[in-house]
Image (cartoon, coloured by chain):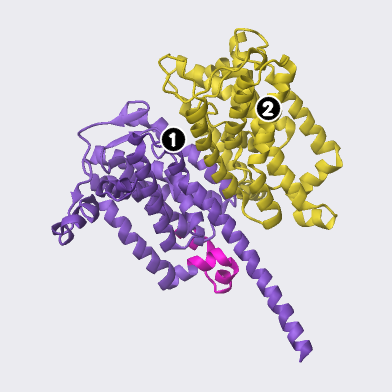
């Protein structure tokens, strides 16, 4: 019964479908950010930090750059966010690719540093003092210029043109990973580094660029969230999108279409679970437990072997 | 600034903040030495915190609360081990999922067990008593610094020494370390790798259960959703920072506890606390980079020595 409610809350009715899509967009983008690095065998845990930095950059470009037409302004903000996101992961990428330093730890530590750094920068230099609403204590910047806002597709709802960015990214990632030579090298580096090296791939370079581009897409995710939904930088806006993206990439098995569907799944869970919590007395945590169990089981090779052995025993009987 | 750092108040707060980090880091070190990079410490702690409140509330005894916390957390750690060891899943992904699972299951269980949502607080729940140490409590300054904590703080100090002795002075510790360095050694000696891997997880469960119990029934008997708030990750940071060498891990976690204590104390001064909160992460980054380049430089010097040796032998 609760699951019917969950489904209805996510997909039935115009409002629910649109809100589900609105939540799916950042999950798809962060999912691709995670998948780009995972595909090359790099476990980038620093997407959360890139989201914050990208969001802050986009907010600052959106606020303080004036007099540009909308298209230029938005692309400038998005590009700046991507640049900052990739530069932030430059050091761990360089260290991992050329010096063999574990990337999980460095990216993870830098992620925390980035979040604290953003909080410091905004609180110290860019805090919005004009706002006298009840949440004035919150760390946040002023609103961005009208030209930097991503337009809403159906006005009262939060869904915005970043939907097309997400779809575009899925298509680019699909073409890149399955149709181009460098995409093949990318996948090979992740699956069998020795084989790739034997085949003449510069695996250090592939690893380096995989982390860098993962950071860039993470920054883009933050920027679309800021320019499309919040219109200002708010501390804590990401709401764990970074780890959500890692989950999306893993549930989607690193395949672009898989990521799209698991992104929509996560968005539906976010939205539907809220609806469910409103109408029934089943809490959000039930959904979280299901997702966590899926994630725990997803790489458990032994579990598959166990099933295989059992089915073999049955066949033997 | 100096006045804030050298202050008994800061010291006491520092010890209080460091204890859960220290305990979790001790478990993390044992796992790390046994070849498992455990990032699920946060989840273990959360489960420990929840079960400690449950035990303390229903059995009306804080000690039984600790006991229940340890038992349930060891069970949770073994469950984590089941996936990592027996099912051969990726330890980072399982740890990641496990942390999420811990947040969700403790939040979910709040309702059926206590009938509330989000948090639980009941003043009738027993809290751990503070114990004054017999000798030290008579010395003027040391009595505020080293005495008057609850039993888990003293246990954590004992555990540092105990685990160090176990890891570096007994055959059990030798086997655990061998498991991390080269599992084939254990197999060649006819020992079960699986058994020792689970044992390491059980030790991590024990220490994290204590850490969780300290958080929930240490000073106030309460539980809130996701109350560990990243302490498990700072413990992981301490493990990485020390390169899993136990005495350094203990020092690092105490240092991190003190850093956040100083951050709290200096909040009133209008000083930016974000940089003090960054200390664990920045130090760890520096440490990792330094060790990476140190390794490289030793290789270089070895090569240089070889070259030198060749030249010398040719000259002769």
Which residue is more in the foreground, A110 or A315?
A110
Q: Which chain is tinted purple?
A: B
Location of the C terminus of chain B by quadrant is bottom right
Compared to residue A96, the image places residue A180 above or below, namely: above
The chain containing the residue under callout 1 comes to B
Compared to residue A144, the image places residue A194 above or below, namely: below
Q: Which mark is residue A261?
A: 2
Q: What residue sits 25% from the left and 52% below the top?
A: B151
Percent of width and height locating residue A11: 61, 15
Percent of width and height locating residue B142: 21, 57
Task: Spot the residue most to the left.
Answer: B138
Which residue is more in the foreground, A126 or B149?
A126
Percent of width and height locating residue B145: 24, 53
Q: Which chain is tinted yellow?
A: A
Relative to A102, is B211 on the left or the right?
Answer: left
The residue wearing badge 1 is B105
Q: Look at the image and say whether residue B191 sits in the magenta stretch.
A: yes
Compared to residue B172, the image places residue B218 above or below, namely: above
The chain containing the residue under callout 2 comes to A
Relative to B49, is A213 on the left or the right?
Answer: right
Relative to A306, is A174 on the left or the right?
Answer: right
Location of the N terminus of chain B by quadrant is top left
Confirm whether residue B288 shows in the render.
yes
Confirm whether residue B41 shows in the render.
no
What residue span does the magenta drawing correspond to?
B176-199
Q: Are marks 2 and 1 in contact (CB under 8 Å)?
A: no
């Amino acid at each position: 019964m609760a699951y019917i409610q969950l489904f209805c809350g996510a997909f039935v009715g115009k409002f629910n479908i649109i809100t589900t899509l609105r939540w799916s967009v950042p999950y798809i983008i962060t999912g691709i950010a995670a998948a780009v690095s995972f595909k090359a065998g790099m476990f980038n845990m620093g997407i959360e930090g890139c989201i914050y930095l990208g969001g802050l950059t986009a907010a600052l470009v959106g606020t303080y750059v004036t007099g540009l037409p909308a298209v230029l302004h938005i692309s400038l903000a998005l590009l700046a966010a991507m640049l900052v996101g990739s530069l932030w992961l430059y050091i761990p990428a360089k260290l991992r690719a050329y010096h063999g330093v574990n990337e999980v730890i460095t990216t993870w530590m830098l992620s925390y540093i980035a979040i604290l750094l953003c909080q410091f920068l905004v609180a110290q230099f860019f805090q919005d003092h004009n706002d006298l609403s009840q949440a004035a204590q919150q760390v946040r910047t002023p609103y961005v210029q009208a030209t930097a806002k991503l337009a809403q597709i159906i006005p009262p709802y939060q869904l915005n043109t970043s939907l097309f960015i997400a779809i575009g990214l899925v298509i680019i990632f699909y073409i890149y990973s399955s149709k181009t030579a460098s995409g093949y090298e990318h996948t090979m580096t992740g699956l069998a580094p020795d084989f790739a090296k034997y085949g003449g791939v510069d695996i250090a370079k592939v690893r380096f660029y995989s982390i860098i581009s993962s950071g860039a897409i993470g920054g883009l995710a933050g920027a679309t969230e800021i320019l499309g939904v919040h219109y200002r930088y708010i501390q804590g806006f990401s709401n764990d999108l970074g780890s959500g993206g890692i989950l999306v990439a893993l549930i989607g098995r690193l395949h672009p279409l898989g990521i799209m569907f698991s992104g929509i799944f996560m968005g539906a869970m976010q939205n539907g679970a809220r609806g469910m919590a409103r109408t029934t007395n089943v809490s959000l945590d039930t959904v979280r437990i299901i997702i966590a169990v899926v994630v725990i089981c997803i790489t458990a090779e032994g579990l598959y072997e166990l099933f295989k052995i059992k089915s073999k025993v049955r066949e033997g009987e | 600034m100096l006045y804030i750092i050298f202050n008994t108040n800061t010291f006491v707060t520092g010890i209080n903040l460091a204890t859960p980090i220290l305990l979790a880091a001790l478990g993390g070190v044992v796992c790390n030495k046994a070849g498992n990079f455990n990032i699920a410490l946060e989840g273990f702690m959360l489960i420990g915190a929840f079960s400690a409140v449950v035990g303390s509330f229903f059995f009306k005894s804080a000690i039984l609360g600790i006991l229940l916390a340890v038992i349930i957390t060891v069970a949770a750690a073994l469950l984590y081990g089941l996936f990592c060891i027996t099912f051969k899943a990726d330890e980072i992904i399982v740890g990641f999922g496990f942390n999420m699972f811990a947040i969700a299951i403790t939040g979910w269980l709040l309702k059926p067990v206590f009938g509330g949502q989000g948090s639980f607080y009941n003043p009738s729940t027993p809290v751990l008593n503070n114990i004054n140490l017999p000798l030290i409590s008579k010395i003027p300054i040391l009595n505020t610094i080293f005495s008057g904590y609850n039993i888990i703080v003293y246990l954590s100090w004992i555990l540092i020494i105990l685990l160090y002795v176990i890891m570096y002075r007994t055959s059990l510790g030798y086997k655990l370390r061998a498991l991390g360095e080269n599992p084939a050694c254990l197999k060649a000696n006819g020992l079960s790798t699986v058994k020792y891997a689970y044992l390491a997880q059980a030790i991590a469960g024990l220490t994290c259960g204590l850490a969780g119990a300290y958080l929930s029934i240490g000073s106030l008997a309460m539980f809130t959703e996701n109350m560990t708030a990243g302490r498990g990750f700072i413990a992981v940071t301490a493990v990485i920072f020390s390169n899993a060498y136990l005495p350094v891990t203990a020092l690092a976690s105490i240092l991190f506890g003190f850093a956040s204590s100083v951050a709290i104390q200096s909040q009133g001064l209008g000083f930016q606390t974000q940089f003090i909160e960054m200390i664990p992460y920045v130090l760890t980054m520096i440490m990792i980079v330094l060790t990476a380049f140190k390794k490289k430089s030793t290789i270089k010097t070895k090569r240089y020595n070889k070259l030198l040796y060749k030249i010398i032998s040719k000259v002769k």
